[in-house]
C-alpha cells in the first residue's frame, strides 16, 4: 500500500493518470493485489483508503482481463475466488479466525467493485472445466521475479466449478445476517444477491466490460446461451432465488403479521430487498438471446419495462413459478409491508421493499406461454394476481390521498394482466367484475384530483405536483381498456361474449363521462392561464402535448 501511495503521490499528472498508467502497464509489481491484500486484513480501514481500495479492485479486474488468455487457470481461479471472498465479507471473517483480529467490513462501493470483478472472471471461465487445484505458482509478469507469487497467498476458499459456486452461495444465503451490520456495509445476504445480480447481468448483456476489452459479440452470444442452458446456470439461480424468497422473505414477514405497530427488523428488510431484487433479475432474462448483445444496444436487465412485454420462460420453470398459493403469499407480504408504510413504520427501507415487491408482481403478471399446462392453470394463476391487485386498489380508493408509486404500478399491472391473459380467461374469474369497478373508481379519483389541483394552480400545469404520475397511471388504464374492447373473443356471437360486452359497458362507460368533464375543465383553465399571463409553450413542447392529448382522446373513445 505504501508503494502504491507513493506512486500516486509522485506522479506529476495526478492520481487518476497514475492509476491509468499502472493499469495500462499490466501492474508488473502486483501493486493492486498487494494493496488489496494488505488493507483487507487491516482491523480498521481508514476513510482515506476507501477510494484507494475501490481503484485497486477495478485496476486488478482490468489488468487480469486484459491478459486473461495468457494467464494460468490456477491464477485465474485464485484471483476470481479471492475477490469473491473479499466482496462477500468472508475473507475478513476467515482472517479473524486465523489471527484473532476482526478486520472492518468493506464499504459497499469497494465490496461491489470486488464482486463485479469476480462476476466478470466467472463469465470468462464459465464454460471451461477449470479447477482451483492446479499445482504451481504463477507470476503475472514472468519477467518480474521480485514479486511474490499470487498462488496460495490469499487464503481464499477455492471453488472448483459452476455447481460448487451455486451451492456455496446458497449455503451463505441461508446463514443468518449479523444484526450489528451498519448501513455503511452490506449484510451477507445483500452481498450474495448483489454478486448473483451482477453475474446474471454479465451474461444477459447489462455490462459492456467484454466489449470494451475487444471481445466479439459472438463470444457474448455463446456465453449467454451457455448460461441459459447450463443446468447450473440460470435455472439454478432461479431455484436459489425462489427458495430464498420463500424461506427468507415470505415466511418471516408473514410471521410478523400477528404483531401490531411494530416495524420489520432492519436486517430482515435489507435481506428481503436483496432477495426480491435477485428474483426480479432472474425473471428479466432475455431468453434465446432476444435483444441482449445486439450490435445496437444492450438489454437492461434490472429494470421492468413499462410496455406490455411478456415473459416466456421455459416449461422447466413451471414448478418454480406456477404456484398460485405462493403468489397469494407474496401478495399478503406486500399488503403487510404497505400497512407498515401507511403507519410510518420502518422508514425508507420499508418503502423500498414495497416498491421491489410491486416490481416482482409486475413481472409475475407478465409470465406467459407454454409454461402453463392448460387454460385452467392459467386462470388460477391470473386469479391470484387479479385478486391481489383488487385488494390494493380497493384499499387505496378508500384513502384520502393515493400513493403515487403504488397506483402507477397497480394500473400497469392491470394492463399487464389484460395484455397477457386476455378477456376469455379473465372474464371467468369471480373477482373480475369487482376489479373493473375498482379500476373505474380509481380512474375517476385521479381525474378529479387532476382537475382540482389544476384549479388550485390557476391552470398552470407545470405547477401541478401529481399531474404526471396520474396521467401515467390513467394511460395504463386506457391501454388496458383498449386491449379488452379490441379483444377478438368479444366478436363471437355467443351469449357469453355478449354478456361480457355488456359488463364492460356498465362498468367502464361512466369513466368516459368523468374523463370528458375533467378534461374540458382543465383545458379551459389552462387556456385562461396562458391568455392571462401572456405565456406560450415552445413549438416543440406544444406539438408534443397536442399529440399526446389527441392520442388520449382517441383512446378514451373506447369507453
Image (cartoon, rainbow, N blue to C red):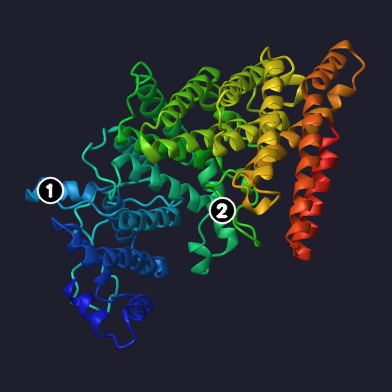
> Circle 2 sits in a helix, a strand or a loop, which is it?
helix
Query: Left or right: 201 with respect to 157?
Result: right
Nearer to us in this view, 322 or 444: 444
Count numbered badges in the picture.
2
Nearer to us in this view, 440 or 427: 440
- When the figure is inspected, residue 557 is found, relative to residue 67, above or below; the finding is above
Q: Is residue 430 visible?
A: yes
Query: Left or right: 128 with respect to 417?
Result: left
Mark number for residue 96?
A: 1
How far from the left and from the top, in percent, is residue 322?
57, 23
Q: Quadrant of residue 79?
A: bottom left
Counting residues from the start of the chain, the first of labels 2 and 1 encountered is 1
| Foreground tag (2 vs 1) | 1
Q: Which residue is mark 2?
A: 222
For the C terminus, give its image quadrant. top right
Query: Left or right: 122 with respect to 75?
Result: right
**Residue farthest to the right, as pictured:** 493
> Circle 1 sits in a helix, a strand or a loop, which is it?
helix
Query: Left or right: 369 with respect to 353?
Result: right
Packing grade of label 2 (10 A; few <14, some 14-19, many >=20) is some
- When the figure is inspected, residue 468 is found, relative to residue 434, above or below; the finding is below
How far from the left and from the top, in percent, is residue 495?
88, 11
Q: Residue at x 59, y 19 (%)?
A: 384
For the N terminus, give its image quadrant. bottom left
Q: Residue at x 66, y 62 (%)?
A: 296
Packing grade of label 1 (10 A; few <14, some 14-19, many >=20) is some
The reply to whether dot 2 and dot 1 touch (C-beta < 8 Å) is no
Q: Quadrant of residue 318?
A: top right
How far from the left and from the top, in percent, is residue 514?
77, 31
**Residue farthest to the bottom, as pictured:** 12
How far from the left and from the top, in percent, is residue 34?
21, 67
Amino acid at each position: 500500500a505504501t508503494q502504491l501511495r507513493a506512486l500516486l503521490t509522485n506522479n506529476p499528472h495526478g492520481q487518476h493518470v497514475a492509476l491509468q498508467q499502472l493499469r495500462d502497464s499490466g501492474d508488473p509489481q502486483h501493486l493492486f493485489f498487494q494493496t488489496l491484500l494488505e488493507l483487507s486484513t487491516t482491523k480498521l480501514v481508514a476513510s482515506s483508503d476507501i477510494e484507494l481500495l475501490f481503484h485497486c479492485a477495478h485496476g486488478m479486474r482490468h489488468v487480469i482481463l486484459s491478459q486473461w488468455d495468457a494467464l494460468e487457470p490456477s491464477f485465474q481461479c485464485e484471483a476470481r475466488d479471492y475477490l469473491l471472498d473479499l466482496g462477500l465479507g468472508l475473507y475478513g471473517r476467515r482472517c479473524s479466525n486465523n489471527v484473532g483480529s476482526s478486520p472492518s467490513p468493506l464499504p459497499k462501493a469497494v465490496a461491489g467493485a470486488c464482486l463485479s470483478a469476480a462476476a466478470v472472471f466467472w463469465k470468462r471461465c464459465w464454460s471451461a472445466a477449470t479447477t482451483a487445484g492446479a499445482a504451481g505458482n504463477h507470476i503475472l509478469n514472468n519477467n518480474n521475479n521480485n514479486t511474490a507469487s499470487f498462488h496460495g497467498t490469499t487464503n481464499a476458499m477455492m471453488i472448483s466449478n459452476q455447481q460448487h459456486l451455486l451451492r456455496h452461495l446458497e449455503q451463505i444465503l441461508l446463514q443468518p445476517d449479523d444484526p450489528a451490520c451498519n448501513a455503511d456495509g452490506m449484510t451477507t445476504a445483500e452481498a450474495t444477491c448483489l454478486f448473483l445480480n451482477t453475474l446474471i447481468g454479465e451474461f444477459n448483456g447489462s455490462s459492456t466490460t467484454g466489449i470494451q476489452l475487444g471481445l466479439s459479440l459472438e463470444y457474448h452470444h455463446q456465453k449467454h446461451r451457455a448460461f441459459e442452458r447450463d443446468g447450473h446456470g440460470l435455472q439454478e439461480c432461479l431455484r436459489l432465488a425462489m427458495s430464498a424468497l420463500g424461506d427468507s422473505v415470505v415466511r418471516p414477514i408473514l410471521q410478523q403479521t400477528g404483531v401490531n405497530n411494530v416495524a420489520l427488523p432492519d436486517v430482515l428488510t435489507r435481506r428481503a430487498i436483496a432477495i426480491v431484487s435477485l428474483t426480479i433479475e432472474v425473471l428479466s432474462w432475455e431468453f434465446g438471446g432476444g435483444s441482449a448483445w445486439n450490435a445496437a444496444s444492450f438489454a437492461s436487465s434490472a429494470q421492468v419495462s413499462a410496455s406490455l412485454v411478456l415473459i416466456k420462460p421455459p416449461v422447466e420453470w413451471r414448478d418454480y413459478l406456477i404456484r398460485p398459493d405462493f403468489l397469494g403469499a407474496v401478495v399478503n407480504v406486500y399488503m403487510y409491508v404497505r400497512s407498515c408504510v401507511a403507519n410510518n413504520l420502518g422508514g425508507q427501507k420499508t418503502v423500498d421493499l414495497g416498491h421491489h415487491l410491486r416490481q416482482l408482481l409486475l413481472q409475475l403478471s407478465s409470465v406467459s406461454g407454454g409454461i402453463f399446462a392448460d387454460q385452467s392453470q392459467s386462470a388460477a394463476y391470473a386469479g391470484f394476481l387479479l385478486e391481489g391487485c383488487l385488494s390494493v386498489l380497493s384499499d387505496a380508493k378508500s384513502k384520502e390521498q393515493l400513493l403515487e408509486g403504488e397506483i402507477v404500478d397497480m394500473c400497469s399491472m392491470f394492463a399487464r394482466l389484460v395484455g397477457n391473459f386476455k378477456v376469455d380467461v379473465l372474464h371467468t374469474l369471480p373477482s373480475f367484475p369487482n376489479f373493473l369497478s375498482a379500476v373505474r373508481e380509481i380512474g375517476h379519483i385521479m381525474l378529479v384530483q387532476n382537475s382540482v389541483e389544476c384549479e388550485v394552480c390557476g391552470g398552470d400545469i407545470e405547477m401541478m405536483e401529481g399531474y404526471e404520475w396520474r396521467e401515467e397511471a390513467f394511460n395504463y388504464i386506457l391501454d388496458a381498456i383498449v386491449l379488452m374492447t379490441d379483444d377478438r373473443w368479444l366478436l363471437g356471437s355467443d351469449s357469453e361474449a355478449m354478456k361480457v360486452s355488456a359488463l364492460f359497458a356498465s362498468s367502464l362507460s361512466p369513466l368516459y363521462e368523468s374523463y370528458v368533464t375533467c378534461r374540458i375543465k382543465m383545458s379551459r383553465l389552462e387556456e385562461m392561464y396562458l391568455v392571462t399571463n401572456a405565456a406560450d409553450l415552445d413549438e416543440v413542447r406544444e406539438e408534443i402535448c397536442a399529440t399526446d392529448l389527441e392520442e388520449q382522446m382517441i383512446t378514451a373513445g373506447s369507453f
